[in-house]
Image (spheres, coloured by chain):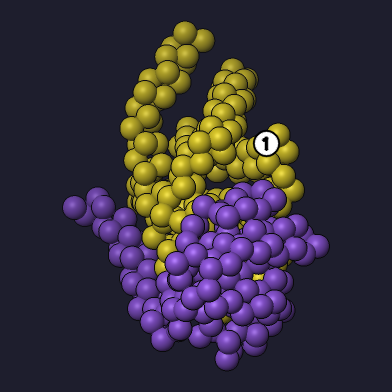
Chain colours: A yellow, B purple
Amino acid sequence: MHSRIRKNIALMGLLLAIALILSYVESLVGLDLLVPGVKLGLSNLSVLMTIVFIGIPEAFVICVLKVVLAGSMFGNMSMMIYGLCGSLLSFGVMAILVRIGGYHLPVISATGGVFHNMGQMLVALFVTKALNTEFILFYIPVLIISGFIAGLITGIIANLITPALKKAVNKGDSTS
Amino acid sequence: MAKYKKDIILTALILLSFLAFWLIRSNGSKADPKSVNIYVDGVLLRAVDLSVDDEFRIESKHGYNDITVKDGKIAVTGSDCDGKDCVKTGYISGNNGYIACLPHGLLISPKGDDSDSKGGVDAFAY
């Protein structure tokens, strides 16, 4: 039991570190998808892996720490607020889908991507007075499709690395 | 196939909502391609005639945006904002989209928006 907890904490630390590196690389390279500012969201890989290998509450911790740490290390306050809202909404929806069951990672991740973008649009509505109705109607379809594609790509990558990670995690099981 | 039934339904729902929003959005073709409005924090700052080449700076309490008007198109060519998404958007004309600089509350928007945009901002933001 204790070794299981220790192992989960070690794995979470590793996944959080990976998430931070992926966020950092993305902020440097600036791989914009379809519209400026829409990123692939590779750091969501860590959240997905935590959901698969450990559990939903632990994944929530990773999700929040990822945004707060990435925001304070190589972002700024407004980035953190946007990121937090997007990530929390996205995480909530993904957690619900996982709880319901029967959904596969790429689709879970793609739906999360859509809601991530919607969450950021909501923050934009509240913190700036800049947006008008036409602008929002103009961008909602773009945000839906770019979030879907970005999430799908991340989810497919997650599907590909799951077997390898499973092997690594189980290997530890047999030796301990 | 039954294994993926839920996935397919959810994907279809998302794509349908994308399609619905895509169809109801104004395609901007009614707007005048040669003029745009520049708003800061939802307040109309100036109307720009795109047929006259021009360069100017918009300064607000948030920072500055350098605007360039060239060959009937407009772009934000410099800014002290964080993401520089406004600069990355590049050139637009008066009927093909928007340039937004959210950190600065700046929005460059087709002129066709004039009639109801103000009410829209208030209705959405407050």
Q: Is residue B122 above or below residue B107?
A: below
The quarter of the picture where residue B101 lies is bottom right
Residue drawn at x 42%, y 14% is: A171
Q: Quadrant of the C terminus of chain B?
A: bottom right
Q: Chain of mark 1?
A: A
Asked if residue A14 can be seen in this view, the reply is yes
SS at mark 1 in the image = helix
Q: Is residue B107 above or below residue B49?
A: above
The quarter of the picture where residue B108 lies is bottom right
Q: Is residue A4 above or below residue B88?
A: above
Q: Going by the picture, which residue comes out furthest to the bottom? A: B115
x and y percentages locating residue A126 in the rendered image? 69, 68
**Residue in front for this viewpoint, A7 or A68:** A68
x and y percentages locating residue B110 in the rendered image? 51, 78
Q: Is residue B107 above or below residue A148?
A: below
Residue drawn at x 35%, y 78% is: B23
Residue drawn at x 66%, y 53% is: B79
* Within-10-Å neighbours for mark 1: few <14, some 14–19, many 20+: few
Residue drawn at x 66%, y 74% is: B39
**Residue in front for this viewpoint, B56 or A78:** B56
Q: Going by the picture, which residue comes out furthest to the left? A: B1
In the picture, measured across the screen, residue A83 lies left or right of residue B89, that is: right
Q: Which residue is mark 1?
A: A74
